Amino acid sequence: MPENVLVTDTEVAIAPALSDHSLYMHHLCYFCAKVEHAIGSMALNIEFKNILQNPEYREELVKEGGSQQVPCLRIETAGQSQWVYESNAIIAYLSEVGTTKE
């Protein structure tokens, strides 16, 4: 995903609603790329945490999520973390929440 991205009014409206979401991933993973592409297509603003570039992200994923499997979507709700694995499950969740949380 490009670092310099033009932000549209739609993205600005969506971004705060998904600020409690983060995607653990790395760029050598096909399924991570699939989720990244879907996030870009839906114009969602979600923090990417590359576990190969930052070992602290990998440690966080294993310690708190229970596995180093990527992609993994972390959802923070009322101080509780929910961990969603599997690219299709992540995309289905984001398709639903991305259209309802504005």
Image: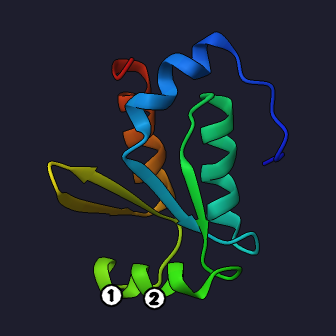
* Amino acid type, label 2: Glu
What is the spatial separation of the Cα atoms under label 2 and label 1, in whole angstroms? 6 Å
Residue 54 screen position, x and y as percent: 64, 81
When the figure is inspected, residue 89 is found, relative to residue 19, above or below; the finding is below
Q: Secondary structure at mark 1?
A: helix
Q: Are marks 2 and 1 in contact (CB under 8 Å)?
A: yes
Q: Quadrant of residue 11?
A: top right
Indicate how the structure is coloured in the image.
rainbow
Identity of the residue furthest to the top in this view: 9
From the image, tell me which residue sits under label 2. Answer: 59
Q: Residue at x 37, y 29 (%)?
A: 96
* Label 2: how many Cα within 10 Å (few below 14, some 14–19, many 20+): some
* Label 1: how many Cα within 10 Å (few below 14, some 14–19, many 20+): few
Residue 56 screen position, x and y as percent: 52, 84
From the image, tell me which residue sits under label 1. Answer: 63
* Amino acid type, label 1: Lys
Residue 68 screen position, x and y as percent: 46, 85
Query: For this rendering, which residue is in front, 16 or 65?
Result: 16
Query: For this rendering, which residue is in front, 93 or 66?
Result: 66
- Tell me: 86 left or right of 54: left
Q: Residue at x 68, y 36 (%)?
A: 40
Q: Residue at x 42, y 37 (%)?
A: 18
